[in-house]
Amino acid sequence: MLVSFLSELGYVVVDFGTGSEEPIDYPDAVGPAVEAVAGGDCSVGILIGGSGNGEAMAANRVRGVRCAVCWSEETARLARAHNDANMISLGQRLLPEELVRRIVETWLSTPFEGGRHVARIAKLDR
């Protein structure tokens, strides 16, 4: 659903998904997407897991990645505006598809505010 939605919005989508319904170890599965964002091959990334928490934890271990777990439009807006999140993580088991669409669209359309947040982000990136 998300690949189609993003494509309809005009985004170029690189799908690093597992392509399977089988259980996986999320630290292994998120690696390619996280490395693509950290390395600059992709400007942003969206991770999807059961709750989204483990995926965000794994992503945030990689230098240059700021991944926020989002569960509402407001968390998505703040992740971008205040934290300049370059990745978000969503809980597939917890969020209805329509809310996922709104979260993703909000996150993608929200600009980083800069200002007082720049110094805070610099501390995260150290």
Image (tube, rainbow, N blue to C red):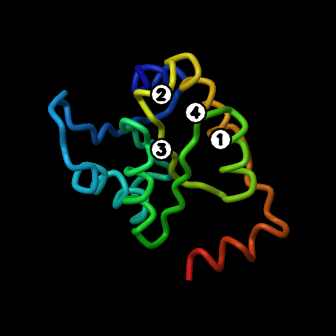
Tell me which label, 1 or 3, sits earlier in the chain.
1
Q: Quadrant of the N terminus?
A: top left
Q: Which residue is mark 4?
A: 104
Q: Nearer the viewer, mark 3 or mark 2?
A: 2
How far from the left and from the top, in percent, is residue 15?
31, 37
Q: Nearer the viewer, mark 4 or mark 2?
A: 2
The vertical placement of 10 against 90, above or below, is: above
Tell me which label, 4 or 1, sits earlier in the chain.
1
How far from the left and from the top, in percent, is residue 7?
45, 25
Q: Which residue is mark 2?
A: 94
Identify the amino acid type marked 2: Leu
* Picture mark count: 4
Q: Residue at x 56, y 83 (%)?
A: 126
Tell me which label, 3 or 2, sits earlier in the chain.
3
Identify the disc placed on residue 89.
Answer: 3
Q: Nearer the viewer, residue 13 or 60?
A: 60
Q: Give the CA separation, mark 4 to mark 1.
A: 7 Å
Q: Which residue is mark 1?
A: 76
Neighbour tally class for label 3: few under 14, some 14-19, many 20 plus, Cα within 10 Å: many
Identify the amino acid type marked 1: Ala
Identify the amino acid type marked 3: Ser
Say which quarter of the image contains residue 76: top right
Say whether marks 2 and 1 touch (CB < 8 Å).
Answer: no
